[in-house]
Image: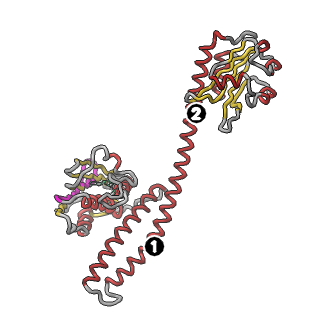
């Protein structure tokens, strides 16, 4: 505002300039000014009924007065006391609504007159645009601050909730294991089957809670990689043992890697989580066909490339860029057929970045998807 009025004084060579804006309470406040004495600013707080200010504001038409003393529209004549003899009052509009008045005054008699109407109105319109931009900027800043506050509250809430949910779940799982292991008496096959289901579902729930805690730890900048030498072939042999094809799916699992894969320096827990999240999705979103996990060493850049591909439902081209976002799900309706909370890929991406690598996705709807994870071997 100060910069605007400074330039305005130069452009119009006026002796005084004042920007008055109407606030939400309906009253006028001067935003910035040059050359008006204090008693004028005080006297001109709210435009009195029938005044020139009120006219300009209500009609959107300017008042150009070459001779303040002789102009019946200017009733108070307070400007004369300050030696200002000619003035221009111009409407300031924001989004076509009157919001204030730009007031220019000169010590020279006849300085402002009707011949400058167009030129001065152009200046007033440009000022309106500048004010509009400022208002947009203020609104944007306010929304950004509110959003940041809301996000912080949400992360704190999720963090507390996740911890609170994990504690009782650990107790449920602990006692279930006790019963399953026969430590509280013999378990018959039906009871075992039921308890296995309890354990499977409790494990799913624990995985969700853990991925929620992971996602929050990235936000808080708490996530760290703990790298150690890992024999990749052995690592994949272990991982492979954890996967069996679910009974309700006609899927074939392929594992394709050489036993001579190198030993790499990596956080094996995080690498396992990345692959597990992608494999779980490949199984979840495929009904028949293949799920293939492959790994190969790329010597030129000393990286390992893992691929998890499936012959499942696939992902539309326009949704591909979104799938790694936190809580994103292609179908988030209440009736969606697949479970999950939309954190698996987000966690996989963040973990891959933490390990100095990346995850990329390719997909053909109806045909299947391939996720490629590139991780540096970390031996340099
Ligand atoms: P969710 O817990 O919902 O699986 P993810 O972050 O793992 O969350 O995945 C986000 C979304 O990306 C999923 O809801 C799904 O719509 C889509 N998606 C992920 N992996 C696959 C896949 N292999 N095939 C088809 N869609 C997938």
Q: Quadrant of residue 288?
A: bottom left
> Residue at (38%, 77%) from the top-left corner?
173
Give the mark toward the camera: 2 or 1.
2
Residue 51 spot, x, y in % from top left: 74, 23
Quadrant hosting ligand 1: bottom left
> Residue at (41%, 75%) from the top-left corner?
170
Q: Residue furthest right?
A: 81
From the image, give the main secondary structure of the stretch colored magenta: strand
Q: Residue furthest front?
A: 50
Colouring scheme applied when the structure was drawn: secondary structure
> Residue at (78%, 20%) from the top-left corner?
75
Does any portion of residue 352 appear in the rendered image? no
Nearest the viewer among 251 and 51 is 51
Q: Quadrant of residue 379?
A: bottom left
Q: Residues within 10 Å of mark 1 (few under 14, many from 20)?
A: few
Q: Quadrant of residue 115?
A: top right
Find out whether residue 295 is within the magenta segment.
Answer: yes
Residue 57 spot, x, y in % from top left: 66, 25
Residue 61 marker:
none
Is 73 located above or below residue 226 in the figure? Answer: above
Give the residue at mark 2: 134
Is 96 located above or below residue 105 in the figure? Answer: below
Residue 76 spot, x, y in % from top left: 80, 22
Residue 201 spot, x, y in % from top left: 33, 71
> Element type at marker 1?
helix
Residue segment shown in magenta:
288-307
Is 71 located above or below residue 305 in the figure? Answer: above
Give the residue at mark 1: 167
């Amino acid at each position: 505002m100060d910069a605007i009025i400074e330039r305005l004084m130069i452009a119009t060579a006026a002796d005084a300039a004042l920007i008055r804006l109407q606030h939400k309470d309906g009253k006028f406040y001067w935003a910035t000014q040059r050359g008006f004495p204090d008693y004028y600013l005080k006297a001109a707080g709210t435009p009195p009924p029938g005044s020139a200010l009120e006219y300009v504001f209500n009609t959107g038409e300017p008042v150009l007065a070459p001779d303040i003393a002789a102009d019946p529209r200017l009733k108070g004549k307070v400007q004369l006391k300050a030696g200002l003899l000619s003035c221009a009052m111009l409407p300031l509009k924001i989004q076509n609504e009157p919001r204030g008045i730009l007031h220019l005054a000169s010590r020279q008699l006849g300085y402002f007159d009707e011949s400058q109407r167009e030129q001065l109105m152009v200046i007033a319109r440009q000022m309106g645009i500048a004010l509009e931009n400022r208002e947009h900027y203020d609104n944007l800043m306010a929304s950004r601050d509110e959003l940041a506050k809301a996000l912080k509250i949400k992360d704190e809430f999720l963090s507390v909730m996740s911890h609170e949910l994990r504690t009782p779940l650990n107790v449920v799982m602990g006692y279930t294991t006790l019963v399953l292991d026969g430590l509280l008496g013999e378990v018959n096959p039906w009871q075992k089957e039921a308890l296995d289901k309890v354990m499977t579902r409790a494990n799913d729930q624990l995985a969700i809670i853990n991925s929620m805690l992971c996602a929050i730890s990235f936000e808080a900048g708490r996530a760290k990689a703990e790298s150690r030498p890992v024999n990749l072939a052995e690592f994949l042999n272990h991982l492979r043992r954890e996967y069996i094809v679910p009974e309700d799916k006609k899927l074939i699992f392929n594992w394709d890697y050489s036993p001579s894969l190198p030993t790499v320096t990596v956080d094996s827990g995080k690498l396992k989580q990345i692959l597990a999240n992608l494999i779980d999705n490949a199984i979840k979103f495929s009904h028949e066909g293949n799920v293939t996990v492959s790994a190969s060493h790329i010597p030129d850049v000393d990286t390992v490339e893992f691929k998890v591909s499936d012959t499942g439902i696939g992902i539309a081209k326009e949704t591909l860029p979104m799938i790694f976002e936190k809580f994103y799900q292609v179908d988030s309706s209440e009736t969606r057929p697949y479970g999950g909370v939309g954190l698996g890929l987000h966690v996989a991406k963040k973990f891959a970045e933490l390990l100095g690598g990346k995850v990329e996705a390719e997909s053909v709807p109806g045909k299947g998807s391939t996720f490629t994870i590139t991780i540096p071997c970390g031996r340099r």
